[in-house]
Amino acid sequence: MENNDIIVKEVSIEEAVKVNRNVIEFDGKDTTKEDFEKRYVGKDNLIIVAYYKNIPIGYIIGYDRDNDGSFYCWMAGVDNNYRRLGALTTLMNYQMNWAKNKGYNKLKIRTRNNRREMLSFLVKNGFNFVSVEQRDDITENRINLEHSLI
């Protein structure tokens, strides 16, 4: 579900870091822009934020991690107070269109077994399971998924 009241903008990392602080799954960890930049600096990247009535409510950070024609959605989250408005769908659609227009052939993402809302979202939106990275605690297993852009 997309919401016409949600606007997606390409932004600076500082704006995404602000939104990250309000994503409940990330426990309010005050991750700095430098922590984020370690991943994507020097690589083709996209940093987007979703705004609802001019309030930043969600974000995605992606970059060319593998240099294999795929684009990696590294961090994504929506403020718990603004879920079910279609922000993640709008963000993901923006990212997929952006990546496709840049010539990428698939979108990769990794989530954890205990992130049930994200897993459900990804399955409903055409992502396919590729592999599972086992952890001692099964709820912490990393699940790798892909979505074709061609």
Image: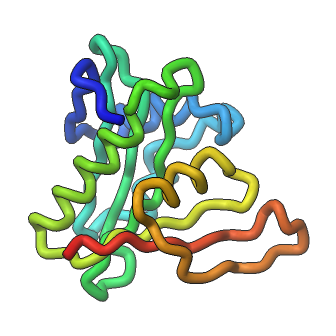
Lateral position of residue 15 relative to residue 105, left or right:
right
Closest to the observer, 120 or 52: 120
Q: Is residue 39 above or below residue 46?
A: below
Which residue is outermost to the bottom?
A: 68
Image side of residue 50 versus residue 149, left or right:
right
Residue 142 horizontal side relative to residue 75, left or right = right
Q: What percent of the width, then of the height, locates residue 72?
A: 38, 68
Above or below 72: residue 4: above
Residue occupying the far right of the picture: 136
Taking the spot 36% from the left edge, 35% from the top edge, the residue there is: 1
Q: How is the image coloured?
A: rainbow
Query: Which residue occupies 55% across, 75% down?
Result: 129
Label count reads 0
Q: Residue at x 42, y 33 (%)?
A: 58
Q: Which quadrant is home to the C terminus?
A: bottom left
Q: Position of residue 78 (x, y in %)?
A: 49, 34
Judging depth in this view, the residue of 117 and 9 nearest the camera is 117
97 shown above or below 77: below
Residue 64 screen position, x and y as percent: 31, 72
Image point (13%, 75%), residue name: 103
**Could you say where residue 23 lies in the image, as x and y percent from the top left?**
58, 33
Farthest top residue?
53
Q: Nearer the viewer, residue 116 or 54?
A: 116
